Amino acid sequence: MSREKGLARGRTGAAGRFPGFDVLSQVGHWDDVTTEVVTARTGPPPPLKFFTGSQAACARVLVNLLTGQDEPDGDLAIPVLEMIDSRLEAGQTDGWRYSDLPEDGQAWRDTLAYLDADAESRCGTSFAGAPQTDQAALIQAVHDLKSADWHGLPAGHVWSLWTRYACTAFYAHPSAWSEIGFPGPAYPRGYKNAGVGRLEPFEVRDAQPGEDPVKEDA
Amino acid sequence: MGSAAGVRTRNESAWLLPNDGTRTNHQLRRDMRQFADDDEIDLVIVGCGAGGSVLLQRLARAGWRVAALEAGPFWDPDTDWVSDEAGSHQLYWTDPRVIAGTDPVPMGSNNSGRGVGGSMVHYAGYTPRFHPSDFTTATLDGVGADWPLSYPELRPYYEQIEQELPVAGEHWPWGDPHGYPYRPHPVGGNGEIFLRGAAALGITAKVGPVAITNGRFGNRPHCVYRGFCLQGCKVNAKASPLITHVPDALARGAEVRADAMVTGIAVDERTGRATGVRYIRGGRERFQRAARVAVAGYSIETPRLLLNSACRRFPDGLGNDFDQVGRYLMVQGAPQTAGRFDDEVRMYKAPPPEVSSEAFYETDPARDYKRGFSIQTVSPLPITWAEHVAAQGHWGSALREYMSDYVHWSCLGALCEFLALPENRVTLAQEKDAHGMPVARFSYSQCDNDRALARAAQSVMEDILHAAGADEVITIQRYAHLVGGARMARDEQHGVVDRNGRSFAIPNLYIADGSVLPTQGSANPALTIMAVAARTASHLAAGDTA
């Protein structure tokens, strides 16, 4: 846990892997339609419309845990829950659902209730009210079930639903792009220096190129 | 090969686009011919994607009175499309669909388009031909099916379409060896890695074939290598029917009726002939009369429409007397393997389609599986890349840490020829869409040969990336491209349409999309769908004897 805490701090900005890289500094090079769509994500998040009070409390903890935004001193605050809520309110699905899951909105509501039920039996509280280590353990338990049953649903399909919505929201945000060195929109400018090791003038080289997460874990 | 001027005499689309930095000829759309519902036109086409657009353009050129009804919008790349992943959601067919089977296939962004141009608006841009062997897999390998059509019969149409898109690439040594009208594009980091790894192992890999202009083509500008090919090309450099066939069709008097969702094909119970289509536009149900109907809604919506058009004469769905509609739906297995390099690859800085190899395309008698796979660069953007990382079991801080490594990764994708199986099919679900029509239920399960192919493809991709210097590799299992579901066959007991795309059961009903393909090879299907539609158009123009 201590290693993860350290990583959660200073991912962007001077101490991150791409020091000084800020996607939004390049807005002047984007086309107008794209600028409108992307900068809207950086404004105040819209009020929740889809999730009710207790669902929202549960969902906020869940999606912030999934996207590593659970650290009190973390430096990013991407409104993942609000982005998911807007999609569900608008019925903007991925265009399919598993036959063994209800449609996406109902599947979110149902699975949040199941998380609360799991927390109740483990800690005697709601999921949002549980200690953070228990929250993480409850989520990990769903992941570890893989294709086995979780409250009558295949756990893997539930995991797919949660992570698809959460990752799509998180990595739609320019702050997340700055964190990973990706410059975002590229029209009409395009790229002139493609190729291994080559940078555009506005790109920033990785300050820790040997930080291979796979090797570290090995 | 035909020069650009030669193409212009038979398809003027690229010259009908503006050359002032904007992407849409609004005048052409304003002046578009509009047929009345009760005017019996020569042909109404359902769907304006790869197949429907080519059919529309060819028959407009032949002087036919023809209209294409498209469920989605008539896109303007300037105002409707963005250089952004999440903001491109409207490009996909996202009406409800149910997926089932032991290996369910996700739809939407993966394989389903919406709007004029169809899924070619968001395809990567790879346009390889099928190999001659794809047309006779039953005879050669005892799997799949033989087409009622041979490769040499399709070759002239491949050549035409390659010139019209136009396709850029190196001389192609596989299948029926051939050249391309445009030189290959320069490659970015991902293509460089693939070429380096393949060379080290002695595997032939080539740059292309991509339907992205290299140099100007008519009024279409050169690619700017921005990497957002899958989000719709705002440059007009990547080919889609919206810019390669629709402009010429409009100039020749065709109509494209966008935002018109066809819900049924009407058949005269006495004559057994189709009389037109029911459709919903602006919230109102209407009926377009037509002497002929062609369906081009792709592998899910085409069977769904035939099934939803059941009537007294066809109680189980149009042309479904032998329970063939919706069956033999294929999807290519598409494992993607990524490799990690200390150097920065920055794979987003080029079109995702750069380099391919078809060295493993054909059946290898030394292997314990039939048919094969191809390997291509894929270059996922961050949201899609997060799927790769999440698939390794990472979430939370671990996911974020892994994602911060994005610029160091190179990613290859395989297209595996999963076999056509009768039980992989579309049926109707209980669930209804916003128009009250039952939605499609697509059930899909792999066979042993499929799984062996995916394993072999993954192992070759891992070898290539290691040979290029990768220290770590990760793989995600996914699917790509749909074809089949209303296949062509020699007779009505084995398929839905004949070699010309004509329904066995209804003499003035045609299908002109990917659903007619009996096998899929390991090639991206767009070019073949267009070539088959162009051939169907030639047959119709030469005198439909129905």
Image: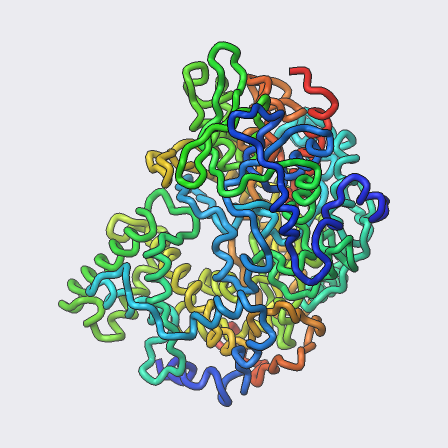
Q: Is residue B418 above or below residue B543?
A: below
Image coordinates for residue A130, horizontal then vertical, percent: 20, 72
Whether residue B448 is visible:
no
The quadrant holding residue A211 is bottom right
Q: At 54% across and 44% down in the image, what residue appears?
A: B451
Q: At 39% across and 54% down in the image, what residue appears?
A: A92
The quadrant holding residue B462 is bottom right
Q: At 37% across and 65% down in the image, what residue appears?
A: A83
Using the image as rendered, state which of residue A122 and residue B347 is in the foreground.
B347
Left or right position of B320 against A65: right
Image coordinates for residue B186, horizontal then vertical, percent: 76, 64
Q: At 65% across and 38% down in the image, what residue appears?
A: B529
Total label count?
0
Left or right position of B486 against B23: left
Q: Is residue B410 above or below residue B368?
A: below
The quadrant holding residue B205 is bottom right
Whether residue B189 is visible:
yes
Using the image as rendered, state which of residue A129 and residue B486 is in the foreground.
B486
In which quadrant of the rendered image does the N terminus of chain A lie?
Answer: bottom left
Left or right position of B9 against B402: right
